[in-house]
Image: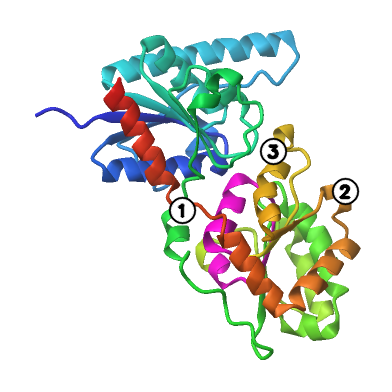
Amino acid sequence: MSKAPLVVIGAGGTGGHMFPASAFAAEMKKRGWRVGLMTDERGRKYTDGFPADWIMNVKAATFASKRPDKVIAAGLKILSGIGAAKKKLKAEQTMLVAGFGGYPAFPALAAAKRAGIPIIIHDQNAVLGRVNRVFASRARIVACGFERLDHLPASAQARKHVVGNPVREPILAVRNLPYPDLSEQTPMNLLVTGGSQGARLFGEVIPSAIAQLPETLRKRLHVVQQVREEQLTDVQAHYEAAGVHAELSPFFSNMAERLANAHFVIARSGASSVTELAVVGRPSLLIPLAIAMDDHQTGNAETLKAAGGADVISEADFTPERTAAILEERLSDAEGLQNRAQAAASVGRFNAASELADLAEGVVQSA
């Protein structure tokens, strides 16, 4: 009995790369494919529940350092990773390799290129990532999360397909829930999710901003906020002094439920965050991460901003005063919140995993 066809996914580094890869893997498994994953130690942290038949750690590195000895060491590590990946691809009779970004994706894509195995890539952001730029000209498909895709080579423009970002099942499960009731008697739910690189700044600015809101608003607020462990005591004290009910934690496992219950969201504008806000349809205030590579988070936020579903302010303007002004305006207008929720939902793409799987199968059929 012949084995089912195999797609190998190369991804890693952050959840922003791994979560869409996981959603794509789940779709391919539904269609009868075997799925392999090549990542590294960092990416391995996000593989709990990843629907793969096997997961292989490959050696990967970045050339970020300018020191010659580190550049040489990185090069040797990458070559070792490519060699190991090529052996595995051949042994498993791989039909297709799909890259989802992050430097741990490089060995799998490079090995596929050397072995003559077709490759496709998916970029979650509005700016093509560094690894995906290397392979865009050779990829059969360049799929992306947003209409805007900066740094895409001219030779790859004809193979660009806007599919959106594959979304995890828990988020899809709540996308049809209505916007929460917002009568004057109900609490107003504010969700603040900063991500690993954003929570510290959010813990410093947002409690001070909320303390500046009128008392009538503060009394209605129920804040759910992601806060770094070392900030919990201080942030809790700020909210208690302001008379605001707050639920704080470094991590929330039921983010889909929290998002569904939110009347307003404050977040970074990573690709997954922007996509999930649009899929569920929730109004937001987005603060792009200033150190993000090529300022891609500002590009990500543009879709929601243009639709009228989000306010966007830079880190430089992210002050308690500016934030308080935006919150007071938005939270005082129930009808406006509902309209902004609908605007966000109007740009939501929730079939990305299926559309990407269609493209992947089309590549194999035409090979």
What residue is shown at x 57% (from left), y 65% (from top)?
259
Question: In the depicted view, which residue is nearer to us: 152 or 115?
Answer: 152
What residue is shown at x 45% (from left), y 46% (from top)?
352
Q: CA distance from mark 3 to mark 2?
A: 16 Å
Residue 350, labelled with which disc?
Answer: 1
Q: Which residue has dot 3 on it?
A: 296
Q: CA distance from mark 1 to mark 3?
A: 21 Å
The kind of residue on which mark 2 rests is Ala
Q: Is residue 277 magenta?
A: yes
The kind of residue on which mark 3 rests is His
Q: Is residue 245 magenta?
A: no
The kind of residue on which mark 1 rests is Phe
Please say which color scheme the image uses: rainbow
Return the x and y of residue 191 as percentages of the image width and height.
Answer: 66, 67
Q: Secondary structure at mark 1?
A: loop
Quarter of the figure that contains the N terminus: top left
Quarter of the figure that contains the C terminus: top left
Q: Which residue has dot 2 on it?
A: 316
Q: Which residues are magenta?
A: 258-281
Instruction: Locate residue 104 relative to residue 208 in the image: left or right.
Output: left
Of the two numbered discs 3 and 2 in the rendering, the one whose residue sits closer to the viewer:
3
Q: Secondary structure at mark 3?
A: helix
